[in-house]
Image: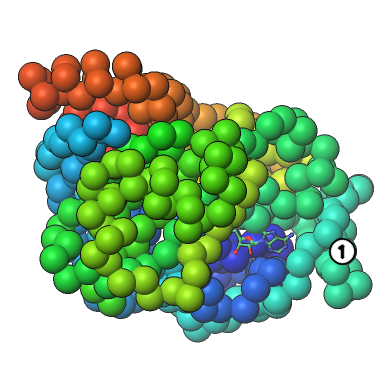
Amino acid sequence: MIIIGGGLAGLTSAIHLAREGYNLLLLERYPYPHHKVCGEYVSNEIAPYLESLNVTLPKTVAIDTLQLSTKQGKLLQTKLPLGGFGISRYAFDNSLYKRALALGVSVKFETVKNVNFLKDVFNLDTENENRYSAKVIIGAYGKRSGLDKQLNRNFINKKAPWIGVKAHYDLQEFPDNLVALHNFEGGYGGLSKIESGAVNFCYLASYKSFQTEKNIEKFNSKVVAGNKFLNHFLRNAQPLFDEPMSIAQVSFERKQAIEGHILMCGDTAGLIHPLCGNGMAMAIHSAKLASERIHTFFKNSDYTRAQMESDYRKEWRNTFRRRLQTGRVLQSLLLSERATNMLMGTIAKSPGLIRSLIKRTHGKPISL
Ligand SMILES: Cc1cc2nc3c(=O)[nH]c(=O)nc-3n(C[C@H](O)[C@H](O)[C@H](O)COP(=O)(O)OP(=O)(O)OC[C@H]3O[C@@H](n4cnc5c(N)ncnc54)[C@H](O)[C@@H]3O)c2cc1C
């Protein structure tokens, strides 16, 4: 069995399946540890599952409060129904990697350039000119990759008009238990603490808005700082990275959970809008769903590949469709000034509404 991509989805499925006794090869582009553009707030939905996999994380920061602000500086605060924790991707992915190694997963740092399925077997080529074969493949290679082109996936030809920017900062006054989401022209930024006590600042902005300034420093000072809370943050926090990291061509188009007989997991199967703070939980949860289907496929000779694919597709849709839809609606509201003001006004009068919106974009803690 081969897993393409060693982010949260790929590493979690590797751990899950290695515990069931399978021999696995995981192919990942970059050696660990490495930073990633991400808000680094993880929903507690996946806490019981991670515990059951015996994954040891460094001391994380418990987060139970959400702040939201509009461009004009209206601020709202609420308790998070489920809550979560703050951890850097540098530490999170590396902890999962160590657990996978301890379970005997073979990890190779190679970039997969194509996959073909013929006579019930996958053949896969890497940029190091190695070829590997497997009966089952999990695609966990994230938001966008050359492989999506090779597999001729629909979303890859559509516009992906978003960029993501992230860096760590030192700002002692920032509360440990808070995740803050602040709106600015053409985007929004999240602030929350990670295990080291640093504050992660990560934002998503439309190209249209970013193009007005074209570089991160100017964009931060002219556009992002248009929100007074972000202005305060940028003026007072000390950057801990030499420069912020960025990713381009972020797409929220619909994707398929099965493509070319590959079981797609995490962002490879679908990316929820980051304002929901739920992408990492979905990546880990989808790894569980795929691993369970694969285990049934190998253990039960009557269970066909077609059944495995159809069951995974259904489970994926049933588990995640509603949150993806709610995420789409919330993102379009947040990026319309009028709609955001109306929404914030309604929420201010009825605080239960925000908690119900949050619940609609989050799952319940995974039952085992
Ligand atoms: C701006 C922004 C902020 C976000 N904030 C949050 C947040 O606060 N909370 C939250 O829960 N979610 C957040 N998300 C979403 C979250 O980052 C993703 O949902 C999550 O990283 C998905 O994990 P994954 O394992 O699917 O993909 P990834 O973590 O991207 O892993 C994919 C891996 O595949 C590797 N890879 C790619 N191509 C190949 C190849 N051809 N061969 C081999 N390896 C390959 C990559 O190197 C990478 O390590 C945010 C997303 C964005 C864009």
Figure quadrant of residue 260: top right
> For the image shown, how many numbered marks are present on the structure?
1
Residue 165 point in image, percent of width and height: 49, 55
Residue 122 point in image, percent of width and height: 83, 55
Residue 107 visible = yes
Is 190 drawn above or below residue 161 in the view shown?
below
Is 317 drawn above or below residue 104 in the view shown?
above
**Label 1 secondary element:** strand
Residue 311 visible = no
Question: Is 184 or 106 nearer to us in this picture?
Answer: 184
Query: Label 1, on which residue?
Result: 125
Question: In the drawing, does residue 13 fall left or right of residue 110?
Answer: left
Pick the quarter of the image with the N terminus.
Answer: bottom right
Where does ligand 1 appear, by image quarter? Answer: bottom right
Question: Is 158 or 51 nearer to us in this picture?
Answer: 158
Is 113 drawn above or below residue 360 in the view shown?
below
Question: In the drawing, does residue 138 fall left or right of residue 228?
Answer: right
Is 234 drawn above or below residue 56 in the view shown?
above
Figure quadrant of residue 198: bottom left
Residue 17 point in image, percent of width and height: 55, 63
Q: Residue at x 54, y 45 (%)?
A: 213
Label 1 CA crowd tier, 10 Å (few <14, some 14–19, many 20+): some
Residue 57 point in image, percent of width and height: 33, 74
Q: Residue at x 42, y 64 (%)?
A: 167
Badge 1 amino acid: Asp
Q: Residue at x 48, y 53 (%)?
A: 218
Ligand 1 within 8 Å, label 1 CB = no
Q: Residue at x 84, y 67 (%)?
A: 126
Question: In the drawing, does residue 248 fall left or right of residue 89?
Answer: right
Question: Is 62 or 294 nearer to us in this picture?
Answer: 62
- In this figure, which colouring scheme has been used for the structure? rainbow
